[in-house]
Image: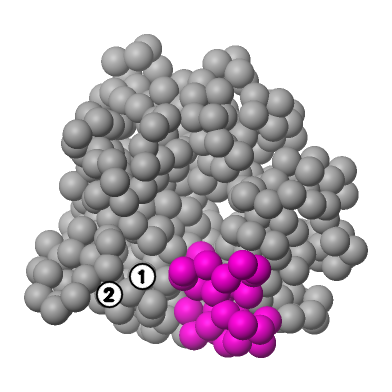
Amino acid sequence: MKLIFDAHLDLSLNALEWNRDLRRPVSEIRAAEAALPERMAGQAAGVVSLCDMRRGGIGLCVATQIGGCMKPRSFVANWESPSQAWAMTQGQLAWYREMERQGEMVQVADLPGLERHLQRWADPDAAAETKQPIGYVLSLEGADSIVTLDHLDRAWEYGLRALGPSHYGVGRYAMGHDVQGDLPPQGRELIRRMDQLGMILDVTHLNETCFWQALEIFGGPIWASHQMCRSLVDDPRQFTDDQIKAVIDRGGVLGAAFDVWMVVPGFVRGQSHPKEMNITLEDIADHIDHVCQLAGNANHCGLGSDLDGGYGNEQCPCDVDTIADLQKLEGLLAGRGYTEADLTAIFHDNFLRVLREAWG
């Protein structure tokens, strides 16, 4: 079993807003939700838990805080004011801290901590068997909860190491992929301060204009934690080949996302179903391969599954029962001619390179 670094998981969102005890197996979480008198889409259909992550060798992840106040108001993780959004992210931080106290997780926020954690997971099978803590790099998805730049400094102090300035809609600091507009002045200030602090810029969800403006301002390490290819699925949520090449040219990495409306054309959320359309991990591999072909190597693609990011198995590849099934990608990619070194790069080494660059 290979060590997997999943570059985008909304763990605290699931724990607090979806009321999931992620210490339990996925099967138990599903059973608890199946007993609810009314269920939202995605309930009783989740695929992520900490023990299933261990079972699948996912010993390290980028775990998010998320609390926006974008307009128009979205259905999840969106509040009326920055102060409310900040308070939500602090509750999420408290959950991560409690998971650390219980030995379920450990925060990774600097180079010595990263290397110590990689030693814990040097043998993923043994680490899973002995229930080693899952390492997490803390990221913020959407910057609306940063009330002032002083709050960004406070976030850096408690271990925030990556930040994506936008999510959906009109944000305080950047425009989401689904709206038009430039970076506002406060967004430019935020990105400059991130650069000064040494924070990683996550360019996922930025609209095209803000994407290019952010790259002009920011000189540090970048990644696109959960991002797919527009040439395969023609939607503003996906990156054009020029955007992908820009991330590659900056030494960045793009994490392949598993939300299937981003993976194949024609999937309609709430209407289509992955089984009916036969959407599988082979379709994920198509996006990975596209990035690798643009780069000319396997050094700029990774995994950023975004599993249980507001949806369940009704909206992920039909051969994924739980997040542990990410391991199936090894055989699929090997069958396409990817070498052992390529697979190691995609599964964890590429994102580790960005962390080492940021923290070295």
> Residue 116: within the magenta?
no
Residue 293 placement, left or right of 328 = right
Q: Are marks 1 and 2 in contact (CB under 8 Å)?
A: yes
x 21%, y 58%: residue: 45
Q: Is residue 75 magenta?
A: yes
Vertical position of residue 303 compared to residue 55: above or below: above
Q: Quadrant of residue 67?
A: bottom right
Q: State the image coordinates of residue 310 (x, y, percent, origin top left).
A: 38, 61
Q: Earlier in the sequence, mark 1 or mark 2?
A: 1
Task: Give residue 170's quadrant in the image.
Answer: bottom right
Q: Amino acid at mark 1?
A: Asn
Q: What residue sits right under mark 2 in the picture?
A: 20
Front one among 170 and 271: 271
Residue 160 in view:
no
Q: Residue furthest top?
A: 337
Mark 1, residue position: 14
Q: Label 2, secondary structure: give it.
A: loop
> Bounds of the magenta span?
64-92
- In the drawing, does residue 62 fall left or right of residue 57? right
What amino acid is labelled 2 in the image? Arg
Q: CA distance from mark 1 to mark 2?
A: 6 Å
Check the image and report above or below for 79 versus 288.
below
Q: Residue at x 87, y 49 (%)?
A: 217
